[in-house]
Amino acid sequence: MNTTEIKGNWDEQKGKLKQKFAALTDNDVMFSEGKKEEMLGRLQIKLGKTKDELHKIISAL
């Protein structure tokens, strides 16, 4: 998953991610240019998943 993939359809993906994991907030899934790793770190902490697991979850949305 690269930045273009996240940026291109992130609004749709973050909605699905928030539906799947109700504990996520808007701040948890906020994507800013150049801060992909920071966002993924927040998700790792909140969901207790590894980076690879997150990539698989997001790719499957």
Image: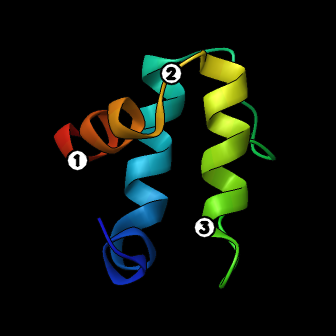
Quick one: SS at disc 1? Answer: helix
Q: Nearer the viewer, residue 11 or 29?
A: 29
Q: Nearer the viewer, residue 41 or 60?
A: 41
Find disc 1 in the rendering and name its residue: 59
Instruction: Name the residue furthest right.
Output: 27
What is the C-alpha distance between the residues marked 1 and 3?
Answer: 15 Å
**Is residue 30 visible from the viewing direction of this image?**
no
Q: Does 21 sit left or right of 4 as displayed?
A: right
Q: Amino acid at mark 3?
A: Lys
Classify 10 Å Cα crowding around label 3: few (below 14), some (14-19), many (20 and above). Answer: some
Quarter of the image where one finds residue 8: bottom left
Quarter of the image where one finds residue 53: top left
Q: Does 35 sit left or right of 13 as displayed?
A: right
Tell me: residue 14, above or below residue 1. Answer: above
Q: Earlier in the sequence, mark 2 or mark 1?
A: 2
Find disc 2 in the rendering and name its residue: 49
Quick one: SS at disc 2? Answer: loop
Q: Amino acid at mark 1?
A: Ser
Residue found 45% across the figure and 34% down from its top: 17
Quick one: SS at disc 3? Answer: helix
